[in-house]
């Protein structure tokens, strides 16, 4: 017999979700609507004058070749970060899952980088890879003879911020992949092994399909991470440079709004950014999710 | 009835706890600033001294983070009607503050408070940055610096070059010859590095050579100004630096100061252009070679170089406070401008003393014979009467403009654009920003 409890009053459920609703309204919808309104205004930072300018801010944005470039940079960056961190996260998880000794210790150590704040991660990588004082950078320049210069070369800078961003996210992906792998019945893999399937074959035919819900979830999370949370890394490592080559959208929002105090342009960019991330997530759910197998 | 009784009791209680002296409490003046660590301590000491010197006012200083954060805190507070009396704002925010309608001009504040200030006694190149088109002071200069050129004395000696003068600038051509010698003889891996490239290589270069940065007197005379930095002189300068990159006489170390400073300290570059605030940093960090400083180089054709321009921040008085409080603000600003405070500030931080009086006093005490480095910047700043062009820059969205210049310059350094293309582009992009700014304030 299943025990069910019912609320007598019709209102209690609403009352119970009210706090959460209020928090969402105040901290998400209200600012979002404010941003939307602001994007149609030209106003001074002190809020003493503002003019309604229709789509002026948007027109300025989309006629600015650099903004279009910033969108491209963001897309490339997020694909790189998500790709690298998903691949390495999965690879390390597979290896760690096979570890025989000190499994718990290995896992704990691998999870640690996730506890590092993005800004700190940026600083750490800067200390390794800065052409003037980075230890690894000196090695690359002196021993490998590569002219490594992220201060001047856009592609090098992109590699540096991608590494710093992906490094942190690998741990996050790792946790989910390990958890996902542990949920896969051993018997399936053993049966395949008895049938003579190689480890690689077992991975592709059994483990990976069964991990696909995790993989899908993580791909969405990683894209969102690379769109927003990498702010701290960009801020500490390149500030969007050199020549705007790592100026991802969220950083441009900050630069124009927070530093440059151009509220209208910044709000318009936020709206574009929000729309873009909604679009990407919808696409992911519409097309990618169809390939996901939620049941074994 | 019971309720009312307890209410009365509570009121009586409160009156007992806070006796009448509460009402004669000194007036609190809030000052939000961006000075942290060592400089923050100096600021705290100055505030303590002011509070101890009189009993009518109490200044409370609060650090609100870096320059951007402090300005944002001020903006947000003003919108919430909880603004401080004094707000420290960096020089690029000057135009925004001036037009904000949220400020109480300093010249007016001082006059209303009954203080007769002799503005001629102030360093004009500093004051002029914060004056309006009519020459009225809008905000009180606080921390002001200017770029100078540091160099590695040992490297120059090895090459047989005599140390440079601290007051007479060398020419850019001379710098080119010296750096060529140093690089060719393998004494220095690279010739020069520069921090804050927009500020040192374009803004100051233009001021020193009396070249318009923007028309309408660098924006002082109207919001409808346009950038002029794609003129042949600036473009030639950038072209020269680009050539120098190819033969290692110039090396790009990043937009801010950390990278360039690291190159100079590691002896990867013989010359290093940065703000005078670098003096303290280098003193702390360099111990394996001797270094010195000289004024920024000038072009051969510039017989009487103009003053360089300043960077740093000033103190803005915000509206919405009582007359009594403003009197306190004025008293505090006057106190800050006193010789004692200016000398203390200058000695501790390396920022300029803002009055000639304090400067002369330090001179007579022999401070500059002991610390000749500290005088390089002042002399460069004071060597000419500021013209309409060299007195400063008054541009809207200046932060964005500096960003644009940085981006375009980086594309010259990495070979994506020619100097002319980059400067044309910088002008075109900046003008769009200026037009948006103009539209906002129309």
Image: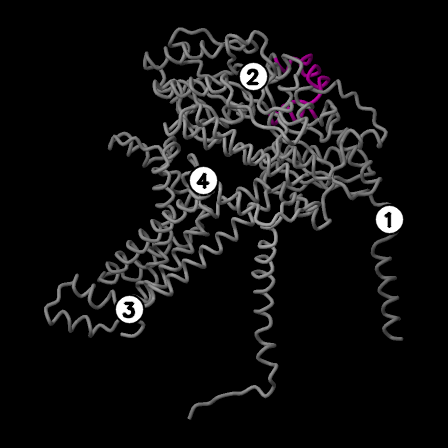
Q: Which residue is mark 1?
A: B23
Q: Is residue B361 above or below residue A68?
A: above
Check disc 4: other Cα within 10 Å, few if <14, some if 14-19, many if 20+: few
Label 3 crowd (10 A; few <14 / some 14-19 / many >=20):
few
Is B366 magenta? The answer is: yes
Alpha carbon separation for disc pair 1 and 2:
50 Å
> Which residue is label 3 attached to?
A182
Residue B412 found in image quarter:
top left
CA distance separating discs 3 and 2: 67 Å
Mark 2 → mark 4, Cα distance in angstroms:
45 Å
Labels 3, 2: one chain: no
Label 1 is found on which chain of the structure? B
Q: Chain of mark 4?
A: A
- The percent coordinates of residue B208 (x first, y second) are 57, 16
Q: Nearer the viewer, residue B150 or A29?
A: A29
Labels 1 and 2 share a subunit: yes
Instruction: Spot the residue most to the left.
Output: A196
x and y, in percent, of residue A33 in the image: 59, 58
Kind of element beneath mark 2: helix
Which structural element holds mark 1?
A: helix
Earlier along the polypeptide chain: callout 1 or callout 2? 1
Q: Residue at x 51, y 11 (%)?
A: B299
Horizontal side of residue A133 vs B347, given as left or right: left
Residue B381 image label: none
* Comes first in the chain, label 3 or label 4: 4
Which residues are the magenta region?
B342-368
Q: Which mark is residue B373?
A: 2
Q: Which mark is residue A65?
A: 4
On screen, residue A192 versus residue B179, left or right, reads left
């Amino acid at each position: 017999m299943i025990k069910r409890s019912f609320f007598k009053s019709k209102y209690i459920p609403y009352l119970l979700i009210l706090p959460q609703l209020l928090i969402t309204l105040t901290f998400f919808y209200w600012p979002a609507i404010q941003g939307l309104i602001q994007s149609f205004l030209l106003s001074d930072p002190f809020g003493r004058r503002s003019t309604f300018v229709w789509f002026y801010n948007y027109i300025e944005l989309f006629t600015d070749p650099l903004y279009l470039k910033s969108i491209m940079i963001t897309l490339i960056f997020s694909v790189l970060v998500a790709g690298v961190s998903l691949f390495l996260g999965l690879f390390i998880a597979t290896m760690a899952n096979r570890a025989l000794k000190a499994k718990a210790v290995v896992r704990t150590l691998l999870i640690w980088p996730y506890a590092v704040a993005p800004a700190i991660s940026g600083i750490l990588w800067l200390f390794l890879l800065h052409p003037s004082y980075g230890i690894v950078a000196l090695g690359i320049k002196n021993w490998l003879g590569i002219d490594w210069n992220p201060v001047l070369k856009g592609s090098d800078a992109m590699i540096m911020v991608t590494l710093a961003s992906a490094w942190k996210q690998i741990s996050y992906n790792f946790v989910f992949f390990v958890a996902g792998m542990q949920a896969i019945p051993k018997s399936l893999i053993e049966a395949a092994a008895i049938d003579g399937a190689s480890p690689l074959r077992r991975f592709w035919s059994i483990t990976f399909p069964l991990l696909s819900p995790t993989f899908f979830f993580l791909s969405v999370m990683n894209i969102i991470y690379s769109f927003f949370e990498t702010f701290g890394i960009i801020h500490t490592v390149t500030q969007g440079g050199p020549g705007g080559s790592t100026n991802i959208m969220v950083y441009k929002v900050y630069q124009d709004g927070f530093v440059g105090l151009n509220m209208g342009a910044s709000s318009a960019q936020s709206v574009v950014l929000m729309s873009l991330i909604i679009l990407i997530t919808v696409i992911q759910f519409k097309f990618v999710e169809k390939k996901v197998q939620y049941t074994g | 009835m019971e309720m009312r009784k307890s209410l009365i009791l509570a009121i009586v209680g409160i009156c007992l706890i806070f006796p009448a002296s509460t009402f004669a409490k000194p007036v609190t003046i809030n000052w939000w600033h961006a000075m942290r660590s060592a400089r923050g301590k100096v600021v705290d000491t100055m505030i303590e001294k002011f509070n101890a010197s009189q009993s009518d006012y109490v200044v409370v200083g609060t650090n609100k983070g870096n320059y951007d954060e402090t300005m944002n805190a001020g903006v947000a507070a003003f919108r919430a009607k909880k603004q401080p009396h004094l707000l420290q704002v960096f020089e690029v925010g000057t135009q925004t503050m001036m037009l904000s309608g949220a400020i109480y001009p300093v010249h007016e504040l001082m006059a209303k408070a009954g203080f007769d200030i002799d503005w001629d006694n102030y360093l004009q190149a500093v004051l002029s940055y914060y004056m309006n088109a009519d020459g009225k002071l809008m905000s009180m200069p606080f921390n002001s610096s200017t770029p100078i050129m540091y160099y590695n004395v040992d490297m120059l000696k090895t090459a047989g070059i005599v140390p440079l003068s601290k007051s007479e600038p060398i020419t850019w051509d001379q710098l080119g010859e010296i750096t060529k010698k140093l690089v060719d003889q393998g004494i220095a891996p690279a010739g020069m590095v520069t921090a804050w490239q927009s500020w040192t290589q374009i803004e100051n270069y233009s001021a020193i050579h009396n070249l318009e940065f923007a028309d309408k007197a660098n924006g002082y005379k109207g919001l409808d100004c346009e950038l002029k930095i794609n003129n042949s002189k600036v473009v030639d300068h950038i072209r020269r630096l680009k050539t120098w990159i190819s033969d290692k006489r110039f090396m790009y170390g990043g937009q801010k100061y950390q990278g360039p400073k690291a190159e100079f300290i590691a002896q990867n570059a013989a010359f290093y252009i940065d703000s005078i605030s670098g003096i303290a940093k280098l003193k702390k960090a360099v111990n394996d070679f001797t270094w010195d400083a000289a004024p920024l180089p000038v072009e051969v054709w510039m017989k009487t170089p103009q003053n360089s321009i300043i960077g740093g921040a000033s103190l803005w008085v915000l509206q919405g406070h009582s007359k009594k409080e403003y009197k306190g603000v004025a008293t505090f600003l006057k106190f800050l401008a006193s010789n004692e405070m200016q000398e203390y500030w200058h000695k501790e931080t390396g920022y300029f003393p803002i009055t000639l009086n304090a400067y002369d006093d330090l001179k007579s005490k022999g401070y500059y014979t002991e610390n000749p480095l500290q005088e390089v910047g002042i002399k460069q700043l004071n060597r000419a009467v500021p013209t309409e062009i060299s007195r400063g820059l008054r541009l809207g969205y200046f932060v964005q403009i500096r960003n644009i210049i940085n981006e375009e310059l980086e594309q010259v350094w990495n070979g994506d654009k020619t100097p002319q293309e980059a400067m044309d582009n910088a002008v075109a992009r900046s003008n769009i920003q200026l037009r948006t700014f103009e539209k906002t304030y129309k």
